[in-house]
Image (cartoon, grey):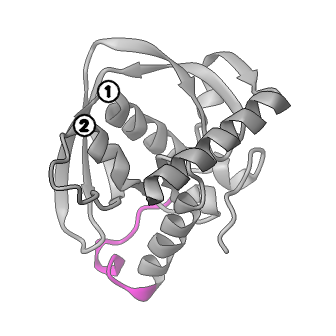
Amino acid sequence: MTKIVQEPNKVLRGLAAEIPIITITTPKVQKIIGAMKNALHREPDGVAIAAPQIAEPVRMFIIAGFVFDLKKKNITGTRSVDRIFINPVITKLSKETKWIPGEGCLSVRWIYGTAKRHKEATIKAYDEQGKAFTMKATGLLAQIFQHEVDHLNGILFIDHAKDIRNMTDDEIKDYQEELKQLEHDHAH
């Protein structure tokens, strides 16, 4: 079972290494992708995870498929697959920024804050087959791109957020019960 590394673990503060493109399809890299999916899917509120968060200091993150379903009207009922971003580079950010409340992180559990993020972000990366792609995003997806690329550069949202606060034990308990209910509803 892959554990999610918690702050102040040093791996979260390092600069993650690029993955040589020719190694993307190797069992070693594919195993890291599997471990990241495993860790992410165990966290019902997790939207994305970067490789350093599972103690793998490489430039890769994954976004849960349901995030893409939030944007489109999913008529077929088929759920989107998780998307892998290898050696991601943000190629464009909107000039316009916005303070977004409620940002959290699976490596800084139960701490939330208001983070300043660009409203739009364009990212260039490779998928798990080693194919290059570019994706433009707004809203939550743009926020995720910025949060995850920060991880690859050793930056946590708590380094630049404001109004940072710990959830109370009661809030955590209520939240976990809410998530269990969501999981149950989603399974049926």
- Disc 1 is placed on an element classified as helix
Q: Residue furthest bottom?
A: 27
Prevailing SS of the magenta stretch: loop
Which labelled disc corresponds to residue 139? Answer: 1
- Disc 2 is placed on an element classified as helix
| Residue hosting label 2 | 71
Q: Residue at x 69, y 19 (%)?
A: 164
Q: Is 19 a magenta residue?
A: yes
Q: Residue at x 30, y 39 (%)?
A: 70
Residue 89: % across, % down = 31, 46
Q: Residue at x 44, y 53 (%)?
A: 186
- Identify the magenta region: 17-27
The amino acid beneath tag 1 is Gly
Residue 115: % across, % down = 53, 20
Q: Residue at x 45, y 71 (%)?
A: 33
Does residue 97 appear anywhere in the picture? Answer: yes
Quadrant where the N terminus sits is: bottom right
Quote the CA–CA distance across marks 2 and 1: 9 Å
Q: Do the CB atoms of the residues marked 2 and 1 lie less than 8 Å apart?
A: yes
| Crowding near the residue tagged with mark 1, few <14, some 14–19, many ≥20 C-alpha atoms within 10 Å | some
